[in-house]
Image: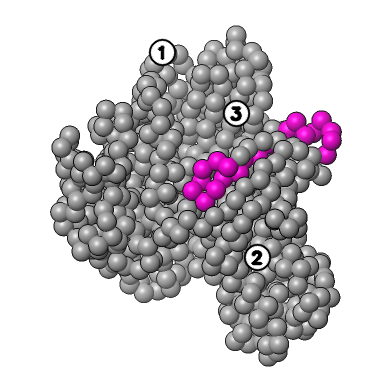
Amino acid sequence: MRKPTAISLLVIVMLSALFAGDLTVTQRLKKAAKQIKSKYPNITQESIESQVMNPNQRSNRDMSDIVGEWLVEDESQDMYITVATDQSHPNVSQMMALEEGEGSIHVSTEFFEADLTYFLDGYIFEDEAARNNRNVYALEYAQNYVNDNAENQGQSIFDLTGEFNLTVDGENVSGGLGGNNPDNCEINWPTDPYKAAVYSFVSEYVIYEGGSVGCFFDYYSDQTYGFVAEELEGDWAGGGNDDDICFYLEMFDSECDGWGDAYWTVVDGSGDIVENGSLWDDACFGDVDICLEPGYYTFNCIGTGTDTDDEISWTLYDSNYETIADGGANDGISFELEDTGEEEGAPYGFIMNMNFMEFFMFLFGEETLVENPTIIAFGSSTDNEQIDMVEGITLIDNEMIEFSADTETALSLTSIDTTNHTITFSDLVLVDETDELSMALSGTFGPEMVEYLAGVETLIEFPDELFDEGTDDDNTDIYTYFYSDSTGMELYVEFDEESHETWSDTSYFEWSATPDTLYLMYEDEEEIELEYAIINDTLFAGGYFYPCEEDYNSYEECFYDADFMFLDNFTDVEGFRVYSERSASWVGTASNNDNVNIIINDYRLYPVYPNPFNPTATVRFNIPTGKSNQNTSLQVFDLSGRMVESILNKKLEPGQHIIKWNGKHQPSGVYILRIESGSFSQTQKMILLK
């Protein structure tokens, strides 16, 4: 999802697919559960471990106690955080529209009245490229700057990758010159002042080592080339000069092996190449933001003249995210970038009468169970606490109707409480473009505030549905088989109420155990180490994961880089970990001679495994007999609805297929996997937790 220049554009772009079409697809949307399983609000180290660990129950166990067939009864993923100072933060579930908030906004139109009780924070729609996390595009930008300006600045052109000990892997860049504590300005600066100025940008915006540009000005003694650091940061962080206009390029390769020697260029009216690039090797999809001065430009995709050109396609979007052109190798388009003078602004949030999964499925064109789906977006054109942009969209008789309030009215009748994270509308009236229809908003609404006490390890509340693999579903069973020869199998069995068919899926592993630790080695060579206990014929197995322990100098850096679930709002963090636990009941003995009948007679997308994953997820799906020669696609979307990668796009034979997705180039977070094959489509959420 790109970041248009006005809130109205953002809302329309996000929801255009949602409201377009005839909305006559079969209802497959199941309303997400509204009741959240009761959890402990404050959990200490001792109470956490007591849930699973009991030395008296495990001291005399050996591997033979585990051998057998087990039925999974429950599984959970919990995040725990410890802070040094008392603080309060909004309920994460309610900020993501996974749970109803406190209060409501009452909507009144001549057609219907409704109460909006779900809030979706605009934070999750921020464009990752706009946030300028570490990526190869920032490095390319810096290299181009040096190539274009070094000689005019009295310096020699140099290769940033070699000079700064960088390693480029796809979009990710690692390495650098290091330092005792780069996050706190203790950086191994180059002795050359020109290279030091360039490295300050690379350190901050390419490999994300902290506020390195500021560190350069504060601690580097020779400021001769301070203007270089200012220009690099100013143009990049600001998306270019103030007058620049941004547009967006999406690149695709049907064989997922990148563009190779093919590349793209943008040429200005004088015939000079002002931007260029390519799709990195082994990639299916890539995108880039391009910001240039108003004027006339030509985009060209330069092929190689070989059969690989048939794999290449691209789409160019303007600042409103409307298509300028699309094509393949050796195609191009001339266009004008024109300043429209639109007011800039960013959405603070969306208030609606549907939860997130209903919203997201609706975004894909599936009919919602919500009557008169309504979404209100609010924000500020000046990025301060004064709300002067309020817009609404609703669906009445399958027709999308848009409403908006004028700036002065929005300012006078809307207020926000930044301490309690609430918004109040005082009978604010929005009108449609004809001024004939109106929508009135009233009420106060916001998320629950959760207290985090100093020194107390506290559970961050998430609905179980976010991590649920179906264990609470009466139609789904998960069996785990531990065989005496140290091999094992996991079997998913699900009954489909619509087709009245039973489905199953298997994965295999090797295992070993000590009296207190269970080791599993899966087919992808991933080894998992779990603590376990057997209590009254129930096997409890769980383990802690410490996602911030490696590769980060601070929790703040880890949370910012992960861009995961508002964690970067916490301050003075002393500890963070994730606990994954599964409980299973004893079924009986198991032999590795057991035969499992895998039924493959219809389309099916099986649960992603593992989930959460880091960084590789295994995707399994069925293509039924009689469905030969049909194109099948697998795509991954982020929470904004933007496709981050096309995993597969080709014709497959009937049978069960296994595809692995490596998310190493993506930030931690929740992703949506979508499969399409013929008339079949299905989505599934998966969590990348680095």
Q: What stretch is highlighted in magenta?
A: 304-324
Residues under labels 3 and 2: Cα distance? Answer: 33 Å
Amino acid type for the residue under numbered disc 2: Ile
What residue is at 77 percent from the left and 84 percent from the top?
A: 191
On the image, the x and y values in percent for residue 362 come to 38, 34
Identify residue for label 2. 207
Q: Which amino acid does label 1 sit on?
A: His
For residue 108, side relative to residue 575 (left or right): left
Which quadrant of the figure has residue 399? top left
Disc 1 crowd rating (10 Å Cα; few below 14, some 14-19, many 20+) is few
The three-letter code of the residue at mark 3 reads: Ser
Label 1, on which residue? 500
For image coordinates 49% across by 39% down, the residue present is 672
Label 1 SS? loop
- Secondary element at image label 3: strand
Tally of numbered discs:
3
Q: Which of marks 3 and 2 is nearer the N terminus?
A: 2
Q: Distance between the residues labelled 2 and 1?
A: 52 Å
